[in-house]
Amino acid sequence: MDIALPTRRDVLGALAGTLLLGDVARADAARRRREHFLFGSPVRLIARGGEATLDAVMAELALIHREWNAWKPGGELGRLNAALRAGRAAPASVPLQQMIAMSTRLERDSFGFFNAGIGAAVGGWGFHDDVMRPGDAPREAERRHWRAASPSLAQLELRGGLVASRNPVLQLDFGAVAKGVAIDRALDRLQAAGVHDAIVDLGGNLAAMGHTVEAGRPRPWQIGIRDPHEPGVIATLAPRGREAVVTSGSYERWREVDGQRVTHILDPHTAAPAAAWVSVTVLHPSAAFADAAATALLVAGPQRWRRVAERLRVTQVLAIDGDGRGEVSGALAPRLQFADAATRRRMTIV
Ligand code: ADP
Ligand code: MG
């Protein structure tokens, strides 16, 4: 079994987003558990059966992590981004082509609040570093340049396995969707190997299928949605069938810029960090979809998220603001057990 040594990001990751609750740490679970550290987050895989598959699944996750890092030059995405900057075409594997196609649709259906073409602005704000150092905001001229260039995946052309761009400012960054894609891949693989009960937890984004077993009896997985303002969970829920619970949190990864905390999630329309919601949780059968949607809704903020959710056809949403007040969609509300009555009173069902 592989267990990564705890690092600072491990501890941070353990605080992120969504938590797996319940008695899953029993010693006899060790054989069917794998833990790694990928995508800047701890990865946990727990499955009943399919032991031989677990290592293959982890290897695949590690491959996605390596090849689709937006800023490390060694991977496929790094090479493609270098070519796009230079105005050249570059080859893309079939999985990368699929990722581009899916992200193009998600950009369109989220009114551009999710936009995987804003890698230049994400890097410019300092979020393409492994360590988040305090620093200055990008100059206004630079921000104007990103806004004016208005990168969109619709500007990509795919011919004979080659990807080219009409916009040299377009840099691909799948940070808001790749973890979801990886989670879906992991469950697909396990399902194909005949596994029915499993959970994949990638730094607080998770998807479950089937049941866990406690005291010899099947029980639903229990998932906690972290309170973005204090230690502990704001609500718990049991996933249904195969379902992902993904949280995008502006508190999770941030830098101090000009003395203020700014989040790694940007509004593609302004090239500035998103400021309104502090965390958005989305439930959906597809983790990739939930991941991209949670990011889009967080950026859209209180005034616009419902319109975006409607267009994306996302119905199960919990959004929390900087004062700890929140909105929960009518479809999700009955499924949530809030931590206490005061927390529930701060939520509006919409
Ligand atoms: P996390 O990775 O912490 O779960 P997200 O899923 O919201 O959070 O992804 C944020 C990452 O996605 C950022 O680090 C950046 O690489 C990229 N990103 C930031 N803003 C956007 C956006 N509006 N649309 C698409 N990708 C974004
Ligand atoms: Mg996301």
Image (cartoon, rainbow, N blue to C red):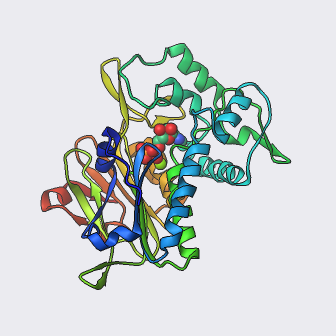
Instruction: Tell me the residue at 35%/43% (across/down).
Output: 277
Total numbered labels: 0
Q: List x then y, in percent, for residue 4.
A: 38, 49
Instruction: Tell me the residue at 51%/55% (across/down).
Output: 180
Task: Relative to 171, say whether 115 is above or below.
Answer: below
Quadrant into which the C terminus falls: bottom left
Which quadrant of the figure has residue 35?
bottom left
> Quick one: which residue is furthest to the bottom in this view?
217
Quadrant into which the N terminus falls: bottom left
Q: List x then y, in percent, for residue 224.
A: 28, 61
Task: Relative to 236, say whether 17 is above or below.
Answer: above
Task: Relative to 246, say whether 79 is above or below.
Answer: above
Which quadrant of the figure has residue 215?
bottom left
330 or 59: nearer the eye? 59
Q: In screen coordinates, is 141 left or right of 28?
A: right
109 or 1: nearer the eye? 1
Q: List x then y, in percent, for residue 213.
A: 31, 79
Q: List x then y, in percent, for residue 171.
A: 64, 33
276 or 191: nearer the eye? 191
> Quick one: which residue is furthest to the right in this view?
160
65 or 54: nearer the eye? 54
Instruction: Tell me the residue at 41%/56% (across/down).
Output: 2
Q: In screen coordinates, is 95 left or right of 271?
A: right
Can residue 92 be seen by looking at this rendering?
A: yes
Q: In screen coordinates, is 65 left or right of 250?
A: right
Can residue 298 be seen by looking at this rendering?
A: no
